[in-house]
């Protein structure tokens, strides 16, 4: 259900102005990004929902460790790439121009995945009950 809520929030987000975000220095931007990631419960909920459906029922310590390492590597690579890419003025302008469309596409994809999880959970519960 959380993924459907997140999908709705993405879909219904409005457009954003080019002057909406303040300009930050490198250290301040790093602190803001780091604190956003560390304090964001959506990350834990997202990975929890993904791992709940993709890991075996009783994963070994090795598999759990590799999953945590994968999440860490994914975060470092993804967020570093975003920071480098979005620091370019042309990319910022294009992103802000297409912000609402990109959020709607993301919202639709998250909604599809959320519905898939709900349907697979209902199917699993029915098979256990029957």
Image (cartoon, helix red, strand yellow):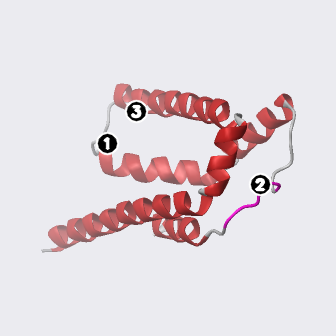
- Residue under numbered circle 3: 64
10 horizontally vs 60: left or right:
right
Which residues lie in the magenta part? 15-19
Compared to residue 12, the image places residue 113 above or below, namely above
Measure the alpha-carbon separation of dots 1 and 3.
9 Å
Q: Which of marks 2 and 1 is nearer the N terminus?
A: 2
Q: Do the residues labelled 1 and 3 touch (CB within 8 Å)?
A: yes
Q: Where is residue 121 in the image (x, y as percent from the top left)?
A: 29, 65
Count up the numbered dots. 3
Q: Which residue is drawn at 31% across and 42% down?
A: 55
Q: Earlier in the sequence, mark 1 or mark 3?
A: 1
Reply yes or no: does residue 17 show up in magenta. Answer: yes
- In the picture, the disc for residue 55 is 1
Judging from the image, what secondary structure is the residue with disc 3 in? helix
Q: Where is residue 100 in the image (x, y as percent from the top left)?
A: 59, 63
Q: Residue at x 48, y 58 (%)?
A: 106
Compared to residue 99, the image places residue 13 above or below, namely below
- Residue under numbered circle 2: 18
60 horizontally vs 99: left or right:
left
Front of the two marks 2 and 1: 2
For the N terminus, the image quarter is: bottom left
Judging from the image, what secondary structure is the residue with disc 2 in? loop
Reply yes or no: does residue 109 show up in magenta. Answer: no
Measure the alpha-carbon separation of dots 2 and 1.
41 Å
Compared to residue 100, the image places residue 39 above or below, namely above
Q: How crowded is mark 1: few (under 14 residues within 10 Å), some or many (20 or more)?
A: few
Judging from the image, what secondary structure is the residue with disc 1 in? loop
Q: Residue at x 54, y 28 (%)?
A: 77
């Amino acid at each position: 259900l959380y993924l459907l809520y997140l999908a709705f929030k993405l879909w219904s987000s409005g457009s954003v102005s080019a002057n909406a975000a303040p300009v930050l220095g490198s250290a301040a931007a790093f602190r803001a990004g780091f604190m956003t990631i560390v304090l964001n419960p959506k990350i834990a909920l997202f990975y929890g929902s993904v791992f709940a459906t993709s890991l075996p029922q009783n994963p070994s310590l090795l598999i759990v460790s590799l999953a945590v390492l994968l999440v860490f590597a994914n975060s470092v690579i993804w967020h570093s790439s975003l920071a480098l890419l979005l620091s370019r003025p042309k990319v910022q302008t294009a992103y802000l121009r297409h912000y609402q469309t990109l959020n709607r596409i993301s919202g639709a994809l998250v909604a599809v995945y959320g519905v898939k999880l709900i349907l697979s959970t209902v199917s699993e519960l029915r098979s256990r009950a029957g």
